[in-house]
Image: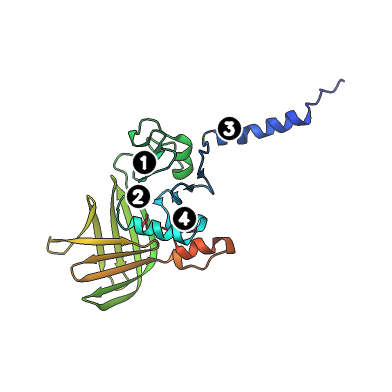
Amino acid sequence: MRSMPRRPVTARLAAACLPVIAASAALAQPVGITYPRQGTVCDSAGQVCYDSYGPSVAITGEYFGQRAASQLSRNLSQSNSRDFRLSSGQACSVARRTCWNDGWSATRVATGLTQHLFGGSGGGGMRPGQAQVSRDRGLCSLSRAGQRVFDGSCQLKQVMQGGQSRYEVRLENGNRYVFEQQGSGFLIRDGFGGSWPVTFVDHGNTGIFRFGDYKLVATQQNAMRPPANRDAALGNALGNLLNSLFQ
């Protein structure tokens, strides 16, 4: 029986590479844009890295250094939006979990980038009105008129829905504080139906809420865990972005 002719080695290698090439084609790499790992994109033009929660102080520090991370932290403290636009012109909405090739015109979904960041194809990664909820443990301190009244463990929660965020902090003594986003600012409501304006400052792995004569400082516990390896040391030392304020 005649044996089938074998294809040249180069042909076999080319065939083996086709799946990899096809997978990469959907995520073309514009100049200055890199994808260090799944769920992460970095833009060298602005020296900022992003994940599914928006700009990440921790990842930015890991790839661009402490100066870039500090600059990003300062910029985030001046804005409550986590949506972003890359130097390639592509724009991504954290609330809608979708990226577009034509920026905020938002008519052409960037399927590859959307899948890479959010794990979906876009234009329906979340149902209309669906809330995105994230939780973590942390350490919190509460002061009133400069006097510390609590210092200990706390539960941290973020609910993002319709482009608006709600942060919930529950102290281990049972007290609970809920900060609701109203437009570009935040409010906290008391038990009598009143509301108070809140000043929120994002310092990467730590968030500071000021309302009335109170100051609440919440730090993610994940950011304080020892790094598993040397390469991750810098990123873990900086912590995960409170862009998720509480992941």
- Image point (48%, 58%), residue name: 61
Quick one: quadrant of the C terminus?
bottom left
Numbered disc in front, either 2 or 3 = 2
Instruction: Name above or below for residue 7 compared with residue 35.
Output: above
Would you say 12 lies left or right of 187 here? right
Residue 225: x, y in percent? 48, 67
- Image point (29%, 46%), residue name: 163
CA distance for labels 4 and 1: 27 Å
Residue labelled with disc 4: 60
Q: Earlier in the sequence, mark 3 or mark 4?
A: 3
Instruction: Name above or below for residue 237 compared with residue 127.
Output: below
Q: Give the amino acid type for the residue marked by disc 1 in the picture.
A: Met
Marks 1 and 3 close (CB-CB < 8 Å):
no
Which secondary structure lies at badge 3? helix
Residue 18: x, y in percent? 64, 31
Numbered disc in front, either 2 or 1 = 2
Numbered disc in front, either 4 or 1 = 4
Residue labelled with disc 3: 22
Residue labelled with disc 2: 82
Q: Give the amino acid type for the residue marked by disc 3 in the picture.
A: Ala
Q: Earlier in the sequence, mark 2 or mark 3?
A: 3
